[in-house]
Image: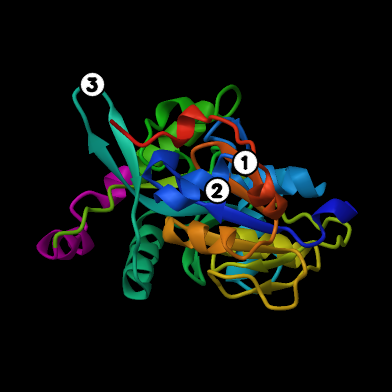
């Protein structure tokens, strides 16, 4: 990492919606450099490109499996994330669904009873569900977190293997239809689990060790990547460690944390889920000039 970023605080966040920030933060960010990109390139992937690391590892389920299972996958593995496909007027919308440990076990047992064998099986590892297979097959290249709330059709695999993927997905959806688990979820006001999103199929890769800033996050995919690089990952924090070294904070949707980070005087670089990259140097607050960023204007 270049010496100019050795004390940066790198921040991974959900959709910022810059106009929703408090007035003080908006004023501070008038000195920042803003760049807009695609929301389908994850905040962590854009950060890794900045740090010179391999962002493609974030599109492999084996990276998350490394953290969830506390070991490298020794077979082909894909993530199998519970989702709700919500019918809209003329399309389906994919919505990621949180499930607890009992629900994960119930789903995996049911799927294995009805679809297990023939060289593939479902397993629970940590907070995730995975599909292990003797032979590879096509899966989506897009993690569930990236397409949450979007139409899934354009993110399905294409070309060879696409028909097999759709067939497997249809089998899973039929298997989950009217599962007793969904009755219990509906009773407590939660959305049903009517499908799984299969993504990142492949085997484990081991990159060359690399020096990366300390990661402070509870996200299994990001922590798994740091582990593969031999870098340090800690639990989630909303403020930088006190040693002054570069760090990566995963603050999710906690927009109020941005104001506190800007007040530290440390150089801050934010990567948001909605595609924004913001380089806010701590020195910027001393400048007498500022840039006008339309994105910072509050909503009308």
Residue 134 in picture, x, y percent from top left: 63, 52
Please determine whether, in this image, residue 191 is positioned above or below residue 209. Answer: above
Residue at image location 28% in from the left, 44% down from the top: 174
Position of residue 150 relative to residue 187, above or below, is above
Left or right of residue 210, residue 60 in this image: left
Return the mark for residue 28: 2
Quick one: quadrant of the N terminus?
bottom right
Nearest-to-viewer mark from 3 and 2: 2
Residue 285 vs residue 221, the one in the foreground: 285
The secondary structure that most of the magenta stretch takes on is helix
Q: Nearer the viewer, residue 193 or 238?
A: 238
- Say which element carries label 1: loop
Mark 1 burial class by Cα count in 10 Å: few <14, some 14-19, many 20+: many
Q: CA distance from mark 1 to mark 3?
A: 44 Å
Q: Which mark is residue 90?
A: 3
Q: Is residue 236 visible?
A: yes
Task: Say if the magenta span includes residue 181.
Answer: yes
Decide which of 2, 182 is in the foreground and name it: 2
Residue at mark 1: 31
- The magenta span reads 173-188
Task: Choose top left, top right, bottom left or bottom right for residue 92.
Answer: top left
């Amino acid at each position: 990492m270049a010496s100019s970023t050795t004390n940066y605080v790198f921040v991974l966040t959900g959709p910022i919606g810059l106009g929703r920030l408090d007035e003080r933060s908006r004023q501070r960010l008038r000195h920042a450099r803003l760049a807009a990109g695609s929301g389908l390139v994850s905040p962590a992937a854009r950060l890794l490109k900045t740090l010179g690391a391999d962002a493609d590892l974030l599109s492999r389920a084996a990276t998350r499996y490394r953290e969830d299972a506390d070991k490298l996958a020794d077979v082909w593995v894909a993530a199998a994330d519970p989702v709700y496909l919500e019918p809209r007027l003329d399309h389906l919308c994919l919505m990621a669904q949180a499930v607890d440990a009992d629900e994960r076990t119930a789903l995996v047992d049911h799927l294995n009873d009805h679809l297990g064998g023939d060289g593939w099986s479902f397993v629970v590892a940590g907070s995730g569900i995975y599909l292990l297979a003797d032979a590879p097959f096509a899966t989506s290249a897009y993690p569930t977190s990236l397409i949450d709330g979007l139409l899934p059709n354009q993110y399905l695999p294409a070309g060879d293997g696409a028909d097999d993927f759709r067939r497997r997905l249809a089998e899973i959806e039929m298997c989950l239809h009217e599962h007793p688990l969904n009755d219990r979820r509906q009773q407590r006001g939660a959305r049903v689990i009517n499908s799984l999103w299969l993504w990142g199929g492949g085997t484990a890769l081991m990159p060359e060790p690399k020096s990366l800033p300390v990661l402070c996050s509870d996200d299994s995919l990001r922590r798994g990547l740091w582990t593969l690089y031999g870098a340090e990952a800690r639990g989630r924090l909303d403020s930088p460690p006190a040693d002054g070294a570069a760090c990566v904070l995963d603050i999710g949707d906690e927009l109020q944390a941005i104001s506190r980070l800007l007040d530290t005087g440390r150089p801050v670089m934010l990567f948001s889920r909605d595609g924004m990259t913001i380089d806010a140097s701590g020195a910027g607050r001393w400048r007498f000039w500022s840039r006008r960023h339309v994105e910072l204007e509050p909503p009308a």
